[in-house]
Structures are given as C-alpha cells and as structure tokens.
Image (tube, helix red, strand yellow):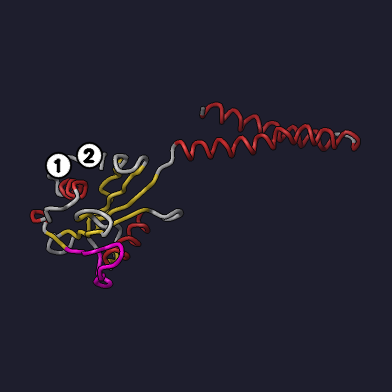
Amino acid sequence: MEASISTLFTAVSTAKGAFRVKFRRAPSATRLKNTIENAAPMVFDKVARRLVQKYWRWRRALTLGVRGIVVDSDGRILLVRQTYAHGWTLPGGGVEFGESLERGLARELDEEAGIAVDDAPELLGIYDNSAAFPGDHVAMYIVRHWHRIRVTEPNFEIAETGFFHPDALPEATNPGARRRIEEMLGLRARDVVW
C-alpha cells in the first residue's frame, strides 16, 4: 500500500510539471480544453489523497496518555484516587492535540495534584494499553524534581491524593501502577504492556 501511494505521489508530481509546460505552450483556443483534461487527475489526486489519509487515520488511530511517578525527598510516591475509577493510581491523563508529552504531564500533575515540574522528567517507557482501550499507549515518566503549588481539594475528578512508601502502597493500588513502580525500583523487568 505504501509503495502504491508513493508511486501515486510521484506520478502526480510528474503530471503537474507536464501540465505547466503544456499550459504555457498551448494556443489559447485549446488552453481551456487542456486545462480541464489535466485538472481532472489533479482533483482526483487531492480527493484520493484525503481518502487514503482518513483511512489510515481511522485504521491506525492511536490515543496517547501520560502518567508520572512523582517521588518526594523521602522516597514516597504520589498516588491519586479518581472519582470515576476504582482504587489508587499514578497521576496523569490524555495528551491533548498539539501538546508534547512533557507538557501534557505537567498539565495533568498541576490539575490533579497541584504539582509543578521543576526539571525534565525521566522517561521510564511507553506502554501498550490496548486491553483497556484499543490503540491506547501510555508514556510513563519519573518526576524527581518538583514543588507543590497547592494542595488540591477533592473535586469531580480526583477524590483524594497521597504520598506512599513503595513498600506500603494502598491495597487498592491499580495493578498497572504497581508494576510501573516496581520497574522503576528495579524489582521487575520492564514490560511493554501496561
């Protein structure tokens, strides 16, 4: 499929060049006829290109989320309890269109826990989360340099936040979050599945 698309684009580029040459040399009586004949493939190309792009967007649609393991000076880890999900998890959420991963992480940490990132976070890995949502991926960062802007009050999204020692995580900690913490600590090999 990719080779045929490449061939199509090459053919269109060649046709556009030929069209320019013909247009300049054609007598005015036949100029309109040639313009119409040559414009039809270009219009078809634009429509076909848009359809192919939309097909691949639909066929290979991905969603991207970001989460952070925020570690305090005592080695405790920030967890949040969301109102719409069971148990405790790592703070984070979806990356907005046009937003970088790190900017999305900073926004989510601010919204969910009143945390401001002071230095570049460390990428732990990118995980396939297709079991929860087809085509979903999660970028996991470790955040060691940060400060608290405010203590967030319970709201419609976050019921509670707290810092926990890795060996004393709440029993209702999300299994994926627990695995990421164990990977960060070197207690388990990194997996590619959330």
Tag 2–tag 1 contact (CB < 8 Å): yes
Q: Horizontal and vertical percent for residue 83?
A: 26, 60
191 or 162: nearer the viewer: 162
Residue 180 magenta-highlighted: no
In the rendered image, which quarter is residue 105 located in?
Answer: bottom left
Residue behind mark 2: 191
Q: Secondary structure at mark 2?
A: loop
Which region shows up in magenta? Answer: 146-162
How crowded pointer 2 is (Cα within 10 Å; few <14, some 14-19, many 20+) is rated as few
Q: Is residue 160 magenta?
A: yes
User: Mark 1, residues whose alpha carbon is within 10 Å: few (<14), some, or many (≥20)?
Assistant: few
- Residue 59 in the image: above or below residue 167: above
- Left or right of 139? Residue 172 is left
Q: Tell me what residue is drawn at x 79 percent, y 35 percent.
A: 36
Pick out the residue farthest to the right: 29
Relative to residue 27, is residue 116 drawn left or right? left
Q: Residue at x 81, y 36 (%)?
A: 23
Dot 1: what SS? loop
Residue flagged by tag 1: what amino acid is it? Arg
Q: Amino acid at mark 2?
A: Asp
Which residue sits at x=33%, y=55%?
93
Nearer-the-camera pick, 120 or 2: 2
Which residue is labeled 1 in the image?
188
Q: Position of residue 73 (x, y in %)?
A: 15, 64
Residue 21, image x, y percentages: 78, 34
